[in-house]
């Protein structure tokens, strides 16, 4: 699960930034986690689906999240990385599933049927990814509670979708609160920052 963050001071080099978000490495330190990514052929047609919307999920938040995901997909597709995301119908096969659950932040996730999602405690949102022995992603799921904050909704949607691409670690540092979607302490950013785009391009190099 994308729950980890690394504390930093000031602006990181591109290399340190990339290794932090891609494998949890502190500046000049070793990777804490494996680097995982979608296979190249899958990445060129990544399907995103709102597969689970519980009956009591607030309609206004559902509408806002759907709009936020379209904006996030447009942003990622324009990054120059070798990626192409698209939304498909709920009943269609999709690599990335979105779950809008009738739970509040601080409560346990339930009813997704996915392990280890069910039983985990959710805050603003949560992304879970699965990968194979070759460190290639084969599934991702994103969960939102019914009380996701309005002010940070678009930022959170973009962050969770970007992390579902394999860039799983957040950055805790004041420099990045208004410059990166990976900020641990702020949901002010609604566009990919320069280093966010750099990291996506390194993870999925343009052809």
Image (spheres, grey):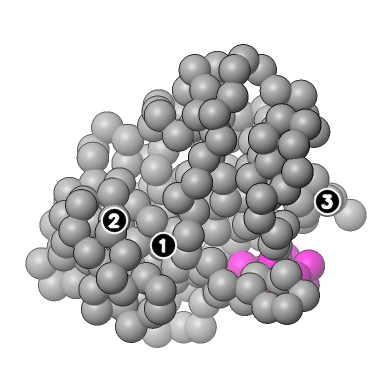
Q: Name the N-terminal-most of marks 2 and 1.
A: 2
Task: Locate residue 76, reporting x and y percent.
Answer: 61, 47
Name the image quarter holding residue 79: top right
Give the residue at x 23% y 38%. 150
Task: Locate residue 27, reporting x and y percent.
Answer: 71, 30
Task: Locate residue 58, reporting x and y percent.
Answer: 14, 57
Q: Nearer the viewer, mark 3 or mark 2?
A: 2
With 54 as the anchor, is 82 left or right in this view? right
Q: Is residue 150 magenta?
A: no
Is 122 above or below relative to 119? above
Q: Are there few (<14), some (14-19), or many (20+) residues within 10 Å of tag 1? A: many
Give the residue at x 31% y 74%. 118
Magenta span: 38-47
Name the image quarter holding residue 103: bottom left
Q: Alpha carbon of mark 1 to alpha carbon of mark 3: how far?
A: 24 Å
Q: Are there few (<14), some (14-19), or many (20+) residues within 10 Å of tag 2? A: some
Helix, strand or loop at mark 1: strand
Q: Nearer the viewer, mark 1 or mark 3?
A: 1
- Tell me if label 3 and label 2 are in contact, CB under 8 Å: no
Residue 51 seen: yes
Marker disc for residue 122: 2
Q: Which residue is mark 3?
A: 205
- 34, 148: nearer the viewer: 34
- 159, 2: nearer the viewer: 2
Q: Alpha carbon of mark 2 to alpha carbon of mark 1: how far?
A: 11 Å
Q: Which residue is mark 1?
A: 142
Marker disc for residue 71: none
Q: Nearer the viewer, mark 2 or mark 1?
A: 2
């Amino acid at each position: 699960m994308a729950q980890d963050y690394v504390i930093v001071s000031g602006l990181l080099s591109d290399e340190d930034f990339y290794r932090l978000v891609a494998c949890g490495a502190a500046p000049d330190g070793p990777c804490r986690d494996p680097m995982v990514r979608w296979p190249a052929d899958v990445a060129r047609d990544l399907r995103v689906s709102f597969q689970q919307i519980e009956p009591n999920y607030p309609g206004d938040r559902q509408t806002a999240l759907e709009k936020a995901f379209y904006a996030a997909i447009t942003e990622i597709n324009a990054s120059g990385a070798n990626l192409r995301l698209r939304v498909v119908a709920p009943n269609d096969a999709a690599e990335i599933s979105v779950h809008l659950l009738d739970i509040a932040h601080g409560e346990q996730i339930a009813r997704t049927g996915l392990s280890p999602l069910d039983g985990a405690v959710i805050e603003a949102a949560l992304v879970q990814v699965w990968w194979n022995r070759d460190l290639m992603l084969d599934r991702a799921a994103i969960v939102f509670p019914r009380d996701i904050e309005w002010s940070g909704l678009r930022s959170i949607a973009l962050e969770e979708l970007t992390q579902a691409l394999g860039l799983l670690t957040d950055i805790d540092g004041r420099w990045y609160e208004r410059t990166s979607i990976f900020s641990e302490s702020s949901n002010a950013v609604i566009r990919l920052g320069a280093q966010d785009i750099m990291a996506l391009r390194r993870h999925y190099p343009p052809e």
